[in-house]
Image: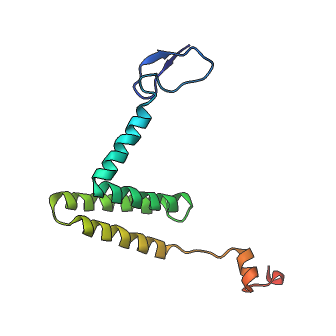
Amino acid sequence: MELMCSYCGKPFACYDNYVRRYCPECQGSGKRHAAQFKERRNSDPVVDIYASQYGKRHTLYRNGKMTKDALDEWRHQVRIRRHELSTGKITVEDFRVWCDETLKLTKASIKTEVPQAAKRATGIISIKQQ
């Protein structure tokens, strides 16, 4: 069976019953890209700060505690800050402090609701009030 590689677009032959998405040449490219990103993250502190902060915010988004618009707005602000960093207007430490402060503000603005079971357990409401 002849398939098209999802990465490079070249056709390749598949001789077993498994549906493959990547040709043999591109099969290990995911590992290569992950290794390159890990190396870049270890060598560049800005990439490391951004990746960890983005991961925290994306977790909030995935759990429904942050909207897509808020995540996109933060990403836009980070692009501006990274540009300021590359031009020398701010330092890496200023960037790190800004990221931490905006995360604190984001978490503070999240309204957490106490589940009904927890309210019952703490005595806030009784079973009769439900």
Which residue, as the protein is rendered here, is positioned at the far right?
128
Q: Nearer the viewer, residue 105 or 44?
A: 44
Q: Is residue 87 above or below residue 32?
A: below
Q: Residue at x 32, y 54 (%)?
A: 47
Residue farthest bottom in this picture? 123
User: In which image quadrant can residue 19 be found?
Assistant: top right
Coloring applied to the structure: rainbow
Observer-nearest residue: 91 or 108? 91
Q: Give the quadrant of the C terminus.
A: bottom right
Q: Position of residue 115 (x, y in %)?
A: 69, 73
- Which corner quadrant of the image does residue 99 belong to? bottom left
Q: x%, y% of residue 105?
A: 42, 74
Splitting the image into 4 quarters, where does residue 15 fall? top right
Q: Residue at x 51, y 62 (%)?
A: 60
Q: Residue at x 45, y 57 (%)?
A: 55
Horizontal placement of 69 versus 76: left or right?
right
Q: Is residue 57 left or right of residue 125?
A: left
Q: Position of residue 64 (x, y in %)?
A: 56, 62
Q: Is residue 59 above or below residue 17?
A: below
Looking at the image, how many numbered discs can be counted on the residues? 0
x, y percent for residue 101: 36, 73
Q: Quadrant of the N terminus?
A: top right
Q: Which residue sits at x=75%, y=84%?
A: 125
